[in-house]
Every structure is written in C-alpha cells, then in structure tokens.
Image: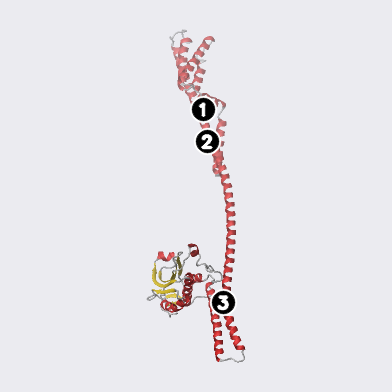
Amino acid sequence: MRKTSRAKRSSGGASSAREASLGWAERLIANLARRKPPLVLGYALTILSVLVATLIEQVLPMRTVPFLLFMPIVFVTSLILGLPEGLLATALSAALANYFFLGPRRSWSLSPPDLVTTFLFILFASFIVLISNAVRRVALGQASQIERLGTLKAAAEASERALRESEDALLRLNGSLEQQVQARTAELDRAREALSHAQKMEAMGELAGGMAHDFNNLLTGITSGLDLAKSRLDQTRITTAQIAETRNYLGIALDFSARAGALTRRLLAFARRESLALGRVDLERIMLGLESPIRRAVGADIAVVFEGIEGIWPVRTDASEVENALLNLAINARDAMPNGGRLTLRGDNVRLDRVTAEALALPPGDFVILTVRDTGHGMSPELAARAFEPFFTTKAPGKGTGLGLSMTYRFARNCGGHAALDTRPGAGTAIRIYLPRFMETSEIIA
C-alpha cells in the first residue's frame, strides 16, 4: 500500500517535471492549435492573410524581395492551422508574387530567372510548412500527454485519498470491534463464573439436604435399635425372650449400618474414588435373582414383567452395580406410577455397527441392552435433558438425593457402556443400559 502511494507520488512528480519542461512557445502553439477553426474557415483565413501580405508589399517599396512577407505567412499558417492551409498559403503566395512583383507587373509572363526564383520559394516554403507542421504535432502531442498525465495524477490522488480514508475507517472499525469483542468476552466470562458458582452452590445444597435426610433416617434406625437394646440390658433380670428381642434390635442397628456403608460406597463410586470390580457377569442369573426383591419393592399395584432373559449374553461389568442400578430404576418407576401400572425389564443382544456406535459414543461390537420401562407419567423434554445430571431430582425435597440416574449413567460409562433415556409426558419412561459383551473366559461373578 505504501509502495503504491510512492509510485503515485513519483508519477505525479514526473508529470510536473514534463509540464515544467514545456516552454511558453510550445504551450502557445498547442493552445492555438487546439482552437483550429473548421476547414473552410481555415482556408478563408489563409487566403485573407496572403492577400493582406500582398497589399502590404504593394504599398511598401519591397520589389527587390518579393517573397519577404509571404514566408512568415506560410510559416504561421502551417504552424497554427495545419498542413493543408500551409500548402495553400505557399501556392497562393507564389502565384501572387509572380503576378504582382516578378517580371512585368500584373502579368503571368516570367523570365527563366524568375521561374527559378519562384521554384526555390515554393521548395523552401514547402520545407518550412513541413517543419512547422511537425513542430505543431509535437507541441500538440506533448500538451495531450501532459493533460493525460494530469488527469491520471488527479485520479491517482483521488484514489489515494479514498484509500487513506478507507484505511482510517477500517482501523477505527477494527478498534471498535476489538473493544466490543473484549467487552463481550469479559461479560460472558463473568456470567459463566456466576452461573458456575450458582450451580455449585445449588448442587452442594441439594447434596447436603439429600445426604442429611438419608443419613438421618439411617442414624434414627441405628440409634433406636441401640437404645432399645441398652434399655433391656439395664434391667436387673433378663429373660430369654428379652435376650432374643435385644438381638433383634441389634440386628436392626447392624442392618441400618450396612445401608449407611452401601450409601457411602455408592458416593465413592460416583466420585470415581472406588474402582469397579469388572468381570464376567451372567445377567440371566442377576435378573432372576432380582425378581422377588423388585416385586416386593414396587408393591402389588404394579405388574412386573421380565422379557428376553433366556439366552442373554454374559457382559463385562460389576455385578453389585448392575443390581443397584436395576433396583434404583425399579424404585424410580414405582414413584412414577403412584396409582399402579406396568414395569417391564427386558434384555436384548445387539450388534452395533459403526454409525450407531458413534452416535452413542461407543465402539462398534456386541452389547446387551437392559431396558427398564414403566407406564408412569413420563417427563417433559426439559426435564429429560437434565435427568442424568448429578443431584437433579423431580421428587419433593428430602425424598431423594438426585443421584440415582446419574450414578447409573456413570456406572454404565465406567464399564465401557452407555445409558439412554426415552420418555414423553403421559407415555411413560424407558431407561436403556448398554453393557459390553464379555468375550473372554473367566469366573462368573454373580
């Protein structure tokens, strides 16, 4: 861009130098030549000029130099008007000089010396006509070139001004845009930090509330059992029935302690601080063993159906996590069907191709799909989008931690599988757990 500006300035400098080198005489000739009259008027002016010169020679005593005044007329005429007018002035001057000033006056009869003189005049005048016409053309060419250079210089200066204005406008716009981008980025960063902080605080609040509720229930059972056992032991006489009752209370306390330990292990697994015991798991045995606990957990108002259990492939996973996931999903389905309904647990052997596997963020291969489907009220798209988020729950405060679905999803991903949700309001909910097929021979963990 700067090179272009320098080139334009050098072009303008060359134009100024050429214009300065053109002298005043050349400028005068060029200006007069540009104002050349039409051809007929030029011929008339030529004839008039020759006649005036003839009249002046007749008045002045210039018979010895009859062509003296005709030479300037020929030169000026050809220089200003052009070649045809110059030749006309030459021929007319020769004819009038012969008629009025050579030989007998007012006679066309000439002696040989007069003929030679006339011939030499015509020859010299023609040479002057050619020279003056050449000078005229050169002056016109230089003037035209200077005009073109001047026009180009003006156009270049205008382009340079427009370019500078565009550059200035672009710089201003760029500066303004950078400021807007920086301000917008800073605003987004602040909003992101505020949102992240709010989400963390909300998650911590939900976790604290849910954990406090669950541990409070567990501690209530433990404390009650221990208090009852202590009251029996404080009696002076203890019967056999009281000893059996005390053992029952201690068993209740131990049971609630085991539940508290299981809750702690689930939290550790969710935080990835406790590794999974991955191995070969026989899903057919797992699901048949869960049939009775699931029926008791959901109640008699809900029909429980197991499908596709026979011939299901063994999978590579953690047996206890599969049991916990299926029990949690069954309890969630029960809560979604307060007036009863149908709960279906199904197993399917599938082979995922590359396209389907990429859509699920899984490698192509063999998988088993465990589907837990209910006929409950379902979820809206907004709620379904957050279903796998940690601590998110649709239950009333204190009724759950919101870790059930998120822990199921985390468990499935940790063992190389996937979890998906299919739900619509009023059409129930289906949770699908993809578990990789076990391809090696190993001890059955179930």
What crowding class fits label 2: few (fewer than 14 Cα within 10 Å), some (14-19), or many (20 or more)?
some
Number of residues whose C-alpha sits closer than 10 Å to that of mark 3, classed few (under 14), some (14–19) or many (20 or more): some
Residue 236 higher or lower than 203, as above or below: below
Q: Nearer the viewer, residue 40 or 264?
A: 264
Mark 2 residue element: helix
Name the residue tied to disc 2.
152
Identity, as a three-letter code, of the amino acid under mark 2: Leu
Badge 1: how crowded within 10 Å, few (<14), some, or many (20+)? many
Does any portion of residue 414 appear in the rendered image?
no
Place of residue 281 in the rendered image (x, y in percent of width and height, measured from the top left):
43, 77
Q: Position of residue 416 (x, y in %)?
A: 46, 71
Kindly identify the amino acid type of the residue bearing the numbered disc 1. Answer: Ala
The residue nearer to you, when weighing 263 against 1, is 263
Disc number placed over residue 217 in the picture, else none = 3
In the rendered structure, which amino acid carries the disc numbered 3?
Answer: Asn
Mark closest to the chain's N terminus, 3 or 2 = 2
Most foreground residue, 186 or 75 = 186
User: Earlier along the polypeptide chain: callout 1 or callout 2?
Assistant: 1
Q: Is residue 267 visible?
A: yes
Residue at 57% across, 70% down: 207
Q: Quadrant of residue 168?
A: top right
Number of the label disc, if any, that sits on residue 139: 1
Q: Earlier in the sequence, mark 3 or mark 1?
A: 1
